[in-house]
Amino acid sequence: MSRILVIEDNADLAFGLRNNLEIEGYDVQLAHDGQEGLTVALAERFDLIILDLMMPGLDGFRVLRSLRAGECRTPVLILTARGQEEDKVRGLRLGADDYVTKPFGVLELLARVEALLRRTRPSRPQGALVRFGDVEVDPASRTVRRGGVETPLAPKEFELLWALIEANGAALSRDRLMERVWGYGADVLSRTVDTHIAELRRKLDPGEEGPVHILTVRKVGYRLAREAP
């Protein structure tokens, strides 16, 4: 499970970030100002830092400068204000890895988080294209096309789909899927798998009389049928 430190002085935004990231399976710690964030970031190991630039006292620029001066190489995603192009440039020059402009959508944030984490962990072995129905999955680029048109998936939606593909038609329980994709057991968030499966079906398998490929196995979980019955 990847650990993420969120350094954000706005309590409502910090809570929303933590909530959405934890739903995706990340272990999230909050720091409510720049000084606290800098202290925690240098004392503990994180896989990603989300850093607001505009904070009172020790702002995000100085936090970022201190992190890089202290040999902290943890990827940093900065949060910038709309229209402040110079803030983005300055943050990137100080060592930030990417940025999101406020206000931002949850899917955009999650996609950037996943992309940064993917850069720092071992890459999945590249494989051949996978097809079922009119869906084509490219594991190398993590892209999915339906009917020849690219269909964006949230990071965990792709991981869930890939877990079903790797099972090669075998049924996977919710517990197993939670362990494979989120890193913990289904008792933590029992509806998470069902919610993501519903989204996958809506995007990739919306049969008129129900799903054809992403199937429910009663009292077990789910499986992927590469060929329609």
Image: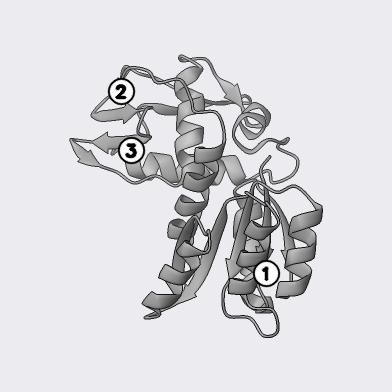
The residue at 53%/65% (across/down) is 78
The quarter of the rendered structure image containing the N terminus is: top right
Instruction: Please name the amino acid that badge 3 sits on.
Output: Leu
Element type at marker 1?
A: helix
218 left or right, relative to 185:
left
Residue 184, quarter of picture: top right
Q: CA distance from mark 2 to mark 3?
A: 10 Å
Q: How many neighbours does mark 2 have within 10 angstroms: few (below 14), some (14-19), or many (20 or more)? A: some
Mark 2 or mark 1, earlier in chain:
1
Relative image position of residue 53 (x, y in whole percent): 56, 74
In the image, farthest residue toward the left: 148
Relative image position of residue 215 (x, y in whole percent): 45, 27
Relative image position of residue 202 (x, y in whole percent): 37, 45
Instruction: Determine which residue is flagged by label 1.
Output: 15
The residue at 30%/23% (across/down) is 132
**Front disc: 1 or 3:** 1
Q: Is residue 103 visible?
A: no
Instruction: Please name the amino acid that badge 1 sits on.
Output: Phe
| Residues tagged 1 and 3 counted as in contact (Cβ below 8 A) | no
Residue 15, quarter of picture: bottom right
The residue at 63%/73% (across/down) is 62
Image disc number at residue 204: 3
In the image, farthest residue toward the front: 69
Instruction: Determine which residue is flagged by label 2.
Output: 132
Q: Is residue 14 visible?
A: yes
Relative image position of residue 16 (x, y in whole percent): 62, 68
